[in-house]
Image (cartoon, rainbow, N blue to C red):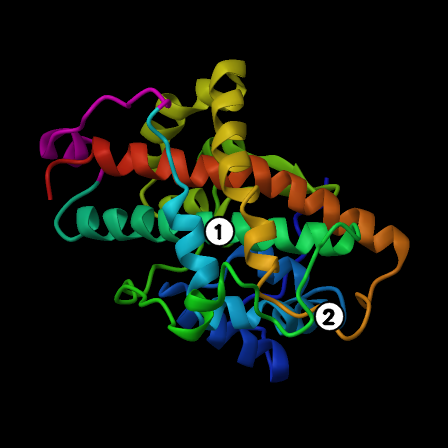
Amino acid sequence: MAMLREITESEATGDIARIYDEIREAYAAPYVSSLFRHLATYPGLLEWAWGFTRPAFVSGMMQHTGWNHVDVSALPALPTLSREDLRALGVIGSDEAMIRDVCRTFTRVSPINLVFAGCLGRVLRGEAEMMGDGVSVSSAQAVREPLGLPKSLPRLPDMVPWEDLDPERRAVVDVFETELAGEAFVPGLYRILAHWPGYLAGVAAALGPSLSDPKVLTTCEAIADRIVDTAPEVLATLGAPEQPAPIDAREKELVLSAIQTYRGTSPQMVGFGTLLLNALPED
């Protein structure tokens, strides 16, 4: 199976690079999600999608709507790790703080992605009810007075390139592989944690069974539904796109399939990222 197509941050130029900069600022995060990197591979699609959703990011409504609807309390906790445990897994010195920032970044980004994906999916399916002037009565206050964003998190290590993964690390990373738009996909959280092979192996052992546990997956779906279902509230503050999406019917189905996959992986990033954070020694 081919790996997920994307335009990486280092490859981005022109309007794509400009939008990537705006995404990092809007997310208060040091990287651009694979959702956007994948959309960028369809000519004109990222520009179109960002164009009509950008006002909700500028106002902060998109971000705060996602963050305010996160509830991972139904997921089972992971065993806590001591610093001795971390050292045994190859995590030493500043590595712990870096891993903490990696987890925090994904728990910050993923809820926003779910709201954005919900908005994009409804528009592509023709289900959106949008205000022509970009303002609804219930949301006017949020649009008039932008909501503050947290301080941006520090720059993260790059995702480990596929070609740099030795067979042992690749086997561990493959535990987290899923399918997105007909292509293999591993969430970025695990591709970054691959810098610490021992730790990632421990994560795979702890989380691996949950990835196929029907009860856990149902809980993750509920986490996603709670966030995605806020999309109409956000769309009500936006004007409709001036042009139809610059993709044909087949490409639209692929994008909708990718969005559906994100409904599975994003709540896992929210939930499992939080569980990983909580399992680390007290900060």
Residue 195: x and y in percent read: 35, 48
**In this rendering, position of residue 259 left or right of residue 277:** right
Question: Which disc is residue 20 wearing?
Answer: none
Q: Is residue 88 magenta?
A: yes
The residue that mark 2 highlights is 241
Which residue is depicted at the point 53% across and 72% down? 55
* Amino acid beneath label 2: Pro
Q: Is residue 88 visible?
A: yes
Q: Main secondary structure of the magenta part?
A: loop
Q: What crowding class fits label 2: few (fewer than 14 Cα within 10 Å), some (14-19), or many (20 or more)? A: some
- Residue 72 point in image, percent of width and height: 37, 31
- Residue 23: x and y, percent? 48, 69
Q: Amino acid at mark 1?
A: Asp
Tag of residue 164: 1
Drawn side of residue 86 relative to residue 185, left or right: left
Say which quadrant the C terminus sits in.
top left
Q: Residue at x 64, y 70 (%)?
A: 52
Most foreground residue, 149 or 141: 141
Label 1 to label 2: alpha-carbon separation = 41 Å
Residue 171 seen anywhere in this rendered image of the structure? no
* Pick the front one: 211 or 234: 234
Q: Does residue 170 appear left or right of residue 6 in this picture? A: left
**Residue stretch rendered in magenta on the structure:** 74-90
